[in-house]
Image: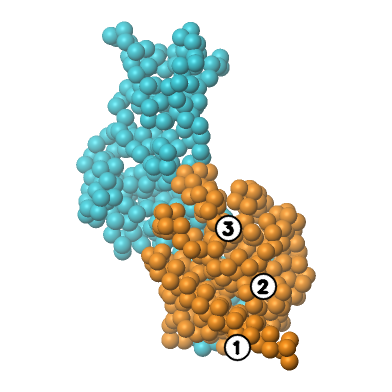
Chain colours: A cyan, B orange
């Protein structure tokens, strides 16, 4: 047995190595053999609790993914993630942020890409859920801009707004889960579509985005002016500005935007 | 923030009870909020936080201060904690006598410290630094533990007592944690209570746990058991009226069930404190 450290920093490092890897031979020498249960059992409580707590955090962040995979497969995926993702976060809320990337690149999950997609969808929903508060741009506020100012208007989206390009009908599967339906082992329909996720008041919403609207919204988020957005819309029928104004009206009524200003960037 | 320590009887606020508390406005004297749950930018958590603070006195209880870690104090965490405190104006802020990780990692667990002079100096300095930064004295809570260090040179209660003297902080005494650690390490829980100075205890935690044949795990997922109620009564006899709350973290029952458990705490406290006052009156008149 390796000699157990006594210096506080070394004690903590050895104990932490044991919790993370289960393999710090010097750790067992740290502890007194008192108490009813064997030392290996008592040390094992910390080793197990670390994993169980993180599995629980992931299960809480990804309820539909948990349901889709089933409890045993979800736990296997979570344990694999935990084995290669240590937490630098003071809040466990942020621990699961790389799960979608992990599932997308790791066998066996990467062979079923809708699994990573569900993780990406749920993480985006969570991001919208507790994103920062912001003012909501109103029709009245827009009325204060003179028509001549409109081409130079730029907009700020609500901090909760997320755009996602999905390859499967993951939102429908999520809705089935939310409604209490069975989703375990179901492969969603292949359906390439762009999606919008945002929070309105305190509720999180999502909806699909038609191709042209998606394009216009992406330009708005990139900081393009209203004139710039109009330029990106197909004007074969001569109604590009009208359609852009119509999108804007919808986004304002859905509370997607938080500010507008005349700028000349 | 102030030092008033007779807040009465409260609950640890958990999201499943948000609506029930706001709609029913139950007879709670105060709420304990988990600091980390509200270190987010917006949305429902902060909405409910503000509504609760309009209705009840609150205290902040954290799990990530990592006061015993040999890593530098996490300034980002402290900044967020101070900003949260400015928002909710808590009666006090508490965290645990533990470390949660080193080398910038977080194990998300309350890891026990060795009870040595080196650890005491280290923790006392950090508690003082935290109090200076926050501008108020903090409460430090005893944790449940499953291992004890071979090189400890003092008991947990001696360490905690000397910490309060050196750092001039207060104690959050978790009655269940005393019971769990006493069982796991084979010490007398009454000796723990007797070793803690009366004037330093500002809050009690009560909770349930999971019993295995030869050890207990502090799971906070069951009702409080009778021996823990007995230990609570013993704590009341020693420390007098101290703000008491029930902490449930898993298998969270309906609000009514926790309120009934809290009512039992009131009954125990009345019985013990009435008896204590009666004895004191008799002693004065004798």
Q: Is residue A40 visible?
A: no
Q: Residue at the spot x=63%, y=63% of the render?
A: B94
Q: Can residue A141 be seen in this view?
A: yes
* Whether residue B15 is situated above or below residue A209 in the rendered picture: below
Q: How crowded is mark 3: few (under 14 residues within 10 Å), some or many (20 or more)?
A: many
Report which quarter residue A228 is drawn in.
Answer: top left
- The reply to whether discs 1 and 3 touch (Cβ–Cβ < 8 Å) is no
First reached walking from the N terminus: tag 1 or tag 3: 3
Judged left or right of residue A256, residue A243 is left
Gap between marks 2 and 3 measured at Cα: 17 Å
Q: Name the residue under label 3.
A: B58
User: What is the secondary structure assignment of the residue under circle 1?
Assistant: loop
Residue nearer the viewer, A199 or B56: B56
First reached walking from the N terminus: tag 2 or tag 3: 3
- The reply to whether discs 2 and 1 touch (Cβ–Cβ < 8 Å) is no
* Whether residue A143 is situated above or below residue B55 in the rendered picture: above
Residue nearer the viewer, B144 or B227: B227
User: What is the secondary structure assignment of the residue under circle 2?
Assistant: strand
Q: How crowded is mark 1: few (under 14 residues within 10 Å), some or many (20 or more)?
A: few
Judged left or right of residue A92, residue A180 is left
User: Going by the picture, which residue comes out furthest to the bottom?
Assistant: B286
Q: Residue at the spot x=54%, y=61% of the render?
A: B31
Q: Mark 2 points at which residue?
A: B201
Q: Residue at the spot x=67%, y=72% of the render?
A: B201
């Amino acid at each position: 047995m390796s000699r157990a450290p006594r210096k506080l920093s070394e004690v903590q490092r050895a104990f932490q190595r044991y919790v993370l890897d289960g393999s710090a031979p010097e750790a067992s020498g740290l502890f007194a053999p008192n108490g009813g249960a064997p030392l290996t059992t008592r040390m094992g409580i910390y080793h197990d609790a670390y994993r169980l707590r993180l599995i629980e955090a992931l299960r809480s962040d990804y309820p539909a993914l948990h349901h889709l995979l089933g409890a045993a497969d979800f736990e296997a995926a979570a344990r694999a993630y935990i084995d290669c993702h240590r937490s630098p976060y003071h809040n466990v809320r942020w621990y699961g942020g790389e799960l979608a990337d992990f599932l997308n690149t790791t066998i066996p999950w990467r062979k079923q890409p809708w699994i990573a997609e569900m993780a990406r969808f749920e993480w985006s929903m969570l991001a919208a859920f507790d994103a920062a508060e912001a003012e909501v741009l109103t029709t009245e506020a827009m009325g204060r801009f003179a028509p001549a100012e409109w081409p130079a208007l730029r907009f700020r989206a609500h901090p909760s707004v997320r755009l996602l390009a999905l390859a499967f009908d993951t939102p429908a599967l999520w809705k089935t889960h939310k409604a209490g339906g069975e989703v375990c082992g179901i492969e969603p329909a292949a359906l390439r579509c762009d999606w919008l996720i945002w929070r309105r008041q305190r509720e999180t919403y999502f909806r699909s985005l038609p191709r042209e609207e998606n394009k216009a919204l992406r330009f708005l988020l990139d900081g393009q002016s209203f004139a710039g957005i109009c330029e990106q819309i197909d004007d074969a029928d001569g109604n590009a500005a009208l359609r852009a104004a119509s999108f804007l009206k919808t986004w304002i009524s859905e509370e997607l935007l938080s500010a507008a200003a005349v700028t000349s960037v | 923030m102030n030092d008033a320590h007779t807040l009465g009887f409260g609950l640890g606020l958990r999201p499943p009870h948000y609506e029930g508390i706001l709609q029913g406005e139950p007879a709670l004297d105060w709420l304990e909020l988990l600091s980390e749950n509200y270190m987010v930018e917006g949305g429902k958590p902060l909405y409910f936080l503000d509504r609760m603070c309009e209705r009840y006195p609150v205290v902040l209880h954290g799990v990530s201060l990592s006061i015993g870690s040999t890593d530098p104090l996490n300034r980002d965490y402290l900044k967020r904690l101070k900003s949260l405190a400015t928002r909710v104006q808590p009666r006090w802020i508490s965290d645990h006598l533990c470390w949660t990780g080193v080398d910038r990692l977080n194990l998300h667990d309350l890891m026990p410290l060795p009870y040595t002079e080196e650890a005491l100096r280290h923790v006392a300095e950090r508690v003082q630094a935290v109090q200076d930064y926050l501008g108020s004295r903090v409460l430090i809570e005893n944790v449940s533990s499953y291992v004890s260090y071979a090189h400890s040179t003092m008991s947990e209660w001696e360490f905690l007592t000397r910490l309060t003297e050196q750092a001039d902080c207060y104690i959050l005494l978790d009655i269940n944690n005393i019971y769990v650690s006493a069982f796991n390490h084979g010490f007398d829980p009454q000796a723990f209570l007797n070793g803690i100075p009366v004037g330093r205890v500002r809050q009690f935690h009560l909770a349930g746990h999971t019993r295995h044949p030869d050890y207990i795990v502090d799971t906070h997922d069951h009702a409080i058991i009778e021996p823990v109620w007995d230990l609570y009564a013993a704590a009341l006899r020693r420390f007098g009226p101290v703000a008491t709350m029930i902490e449930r973290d898993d298998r969270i029952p309906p609000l009514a069930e926790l309120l009934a458990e809290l009512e039992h705490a009131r009954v125990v406290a009345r019985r013990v404190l009435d008896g204590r006052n009666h004895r004191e009156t008799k002693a004065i008149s004798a």
